[in-house]
Amino acid sequence: MTLKDVLAKAYNGETLSIGDIKQILMASPEEEYQIFELARLLRNRYFDNTAYAYGFVYFTTYCKNKCYFCYYRQGNKAAPRYRKTKSDVVDLACKLAKSGVHLIDLTMGEDPYFKEHPEELEEIVREVHEKTKLPIMISPGVVDPVTLASLKDAGGVWYALYQETYDRNLFSQMRYEQDYDTRMELKLQAKNLGYLVEEGLMTGFGDTIEQQAEGIFHMGEVEPSQIRTMTFVPQKGTPLENMKKSNSNKELLMIAAMRLSYPDKLIPASLDVEGLGGLKKRLNAGANVITSLIPPEEGLAGVSQSELDIDNGSRSLNQIIPIIRECGLELGSHEKYQKYILKNQSTVMV
Ligand code: SF4
């Protein structure tokens, strides 16, 4: 099958195989143009030229884990550590809500403090939800099923838990001493509780095209409503700090392959990898959610770029809107975003 045949399959809404996805990921620079063009066409077929923006509050950077790729892995003395109070988190979330974001993403490392005090975590989610009236995405890592359920009751709508790879060997090289199956199982439990799930892959970590294609194909099996990919950024103070940083070309092709495989799903263009300067190319590859908007000068960090474009105010709605428009998109209304949630929740509940 030629790339032209693969693109015709995607255009006609047929399921792409791992082999098809590999063809997309191996495209030559000349072929990439057609792939990105089709990705935009499919995005616009399902989302009417709309994009959404998510506020990001990384409220505790303490973590018990030692993921090899992560700046905030336990024991990394180079990483800034903080744990925001509930009132700080609520204030920050309210600022983001006032700026017009569609969702508040409450992200944390697997902070032992909250493992011991899950009720405080629940209170944070509840109060942010009550005060902002926005949908909440929780990204707490692996939590026990009781906590997962209580965070849902507190107002959690989305549960983000990234496998990062669907290759078990690579997984064990990424997530030190963590269990592949526990992570997968928790996503399914979250869906049973009525959460929408976000799944994610990392690239630029020594992953092969085969592994990337398998990841994109298999990530659909947990029926996520949002899927993302990000390029690995080597982090100071980690075992991989001297690894060569990849450019974002593969991430762009993976975004496009995700759009061609799952045209009706939300796909983020994260500001966390290349900041505002990397937004346009990600939207032009088929993404339609701008993630990691962070209020400036509040002492908040990003995940893969702890400082990039934060305190200069570039991760804000008024900075991204002109770029969204240059890409032929408009910010969707809150009502439209809510409709997406309800539509996806109805499939979760069936
Ligand atoms: S990726 Fe998450 S779980 Fe892993 S070390 Fe970093 S903060 Fe902890």
Image (cartoon, rainbow, N blue to C red):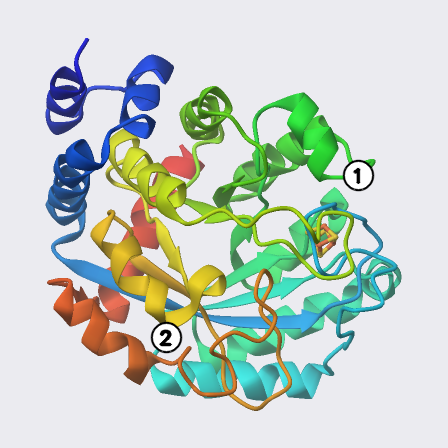
Would you place residue 150 above or below residue 37 in this image? below
Measuring from the top left, give residue 286's x and y in whole percent. Answer: 24, 47
Name the residue tied to disc 1: 176
Q: Residue at horizontal 89%, vertical 61%?
A: 116
The residue lying at 51 percent from left, 70 percent from top is 56
* Residue 236: mark in rendering: none
Assign a secondary structure to mark 2.
Answer: loop
Instruction: Tell me if 173 is positioned left or right of 247 in this view.
Output: right
Left or right of 106? Residue 328 is left
Dividing the picture into quadrants, the one containing residue 261 is top left
Please, what is the three-letter code of the amino acid marked with disc 1? Tyr
Disc 1, SS: loop
Q: Which residue is mark 2?
A: 101
Q: Is mark 1 within 8 Å of ligand 1?
A: no
Number of numbered discs on residues:
2
Upstream in sequence: badge 2 or badge 1: 2
Instruction: Give residue 346's position: percent from left, percent from top.
Output: 35, 41
> How many residues crowd around disc 2 within 10 Å: few (fewer than 14), some, or many (20 or more)?
many
- Marks 2 and 1, how far apart at CA: 34 Å
Amino acid residing under circle 2: Val
The label nearer to you, 2 versus 1, is: 1
Residue 256: quarter of image: top left
Does residue 182 appear anywhere in the picture? no
Residue 282 locus on image (x, y percent): 30, 54
State left or right for residue 268 relative to residue 180: left
Identify the image quadrant of the C terminus.
top left
Report x, y in % for residue 260. 24, 33
- Say if mark 2 contacts mark 1, CB within 8 Å: no
The answer to whether residue 75 is above or below residue 61 is above
In front here: 73 or 238? 238
| Residue 236 appears in the rendering | yes
